[in-house]
Amino acid sequence: MNSFLVGFKPIISINAKILILGSMPSSTSIKLQQYYGHPRNTFWPIMSTLLNENSDNNYSSRKDWIISNNIAVWDVLQNCERTGSLDANINSSTAKANDFTRLFNDYPNIKQVFFNGKLAEKLYKQYVLPSLNNQYNYLTYYYLPSTSPAYAALKLEQKIEAWKVINQSMVK
C-alpha cells in the first residue's frame, strides 16, 4: 500500500553557500522527524568526518554544525506517494517538488548544489530545472554517491573520498 509522505523543511541559514539535496526522507527518517535518520545511512558519519565534528552528537547538534559550516540540507520532493522507503517505489505521478525558486531567492548565497544519489539528481532535472529561469545559471551542480543503506556499491571510506568535493567547495 502506498503512503502519502510529506518531507521536511530545510536545514538552512541565510549564510548557506552549499545545498545538499536528497530525494525524499525514508520511512525511518519521517518517523524520527530527522534528515537521514536511518541508523545505517552514512550521511551523518560522512559529514562529521568532513567537518571534523562528533558523529555521536544528537540531531539538534548535528543540524547546528551543518548550519555553522554554511551548508543547507533539503530534499527535491515536497511530497509523494511511496511504498516503503526505497526511492525506486516513489510514485512519480504523485510527486511534487519543493519550491526551489523561492529557496534560491530567499538564500542567494547558495551557489553549489550537491545531489545525494542519482535519484535526487534525476528528480531535480525532471521537476525543478525546467521551472528555473536563467537567473539561476550561476548554480553549479555535483553528483555524490548516495548515503542510503540501500546503496552498497561503495564502502564508507569510498563514499567519504567522493564527498570530499564538499570540503574543496567550502574553501572557494
Image (tube, rainbow, N blue to C red):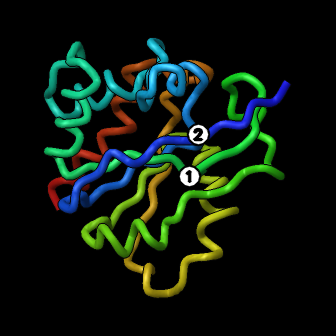
- For disc 2, the marked residue is 24
Seen as rendered, the residue at the extreme bottom is 134
How many numbered discs sit on the rendered protein? Answer: 2
Residue 43 placed where, x, y %?
A: 39, 28
- For disc 1, the marked residue is 76
* Circle 1 Cα neighbour tier, 10 Å, few/some/many (<14 / 14–19 / ≥20): many
Residue 117 placed where, x, y %?
A: 55, 40
Q: Residue type at mark 1: give it.
A: Val
Residue at 49% of width from left, 17% of height from top?
38
Label 1 and label 2: CA atoms lie apart by 7 Å
Residue 172 placed where, x, y %?
A: 18, 62
* Circle 2 Cα neighbour tier, 10 Å, few/some/many (<14 / 14–19 / ≥20): many
Please give left or right for residue 84 compared with residue 164 in the image. right
Residue at 28% of width from left, 24% of height from top?
59
What label sits on residue 48 in the rendered view?
none
> In which quadrant is the N terminus drawn?
top right
Marks 1/2 in contact by CB < 8 Å: the verdict is yes
Mark 1 or 2, nearer chain start:
2
Residue at 81% of width from left, 30% of height from top?
2
The residue tagged with tag 1: helix, strand or loop? loop
Residue at 26% of width from left, 49% of height from top?
71
Q: Nearer the viewer, residue 2 or 167?
A: 2
Q: Is residue 162 above or below residue 86?
A: below
The residue tagged with tag 2: helix, strand or loop? loop
Please give left or right for residue 73 compared with residue 77 in the image. left
Q: Nearer the viewer, residue 100 or 42?
A: 100
Question: Can you tell which quarter of the image residue 55 is in?
Answer: top left
Q: Nearer the viewer, residue 113 or 1?
A: 1
Q: Residue type at mark 2: give it.
A: Met
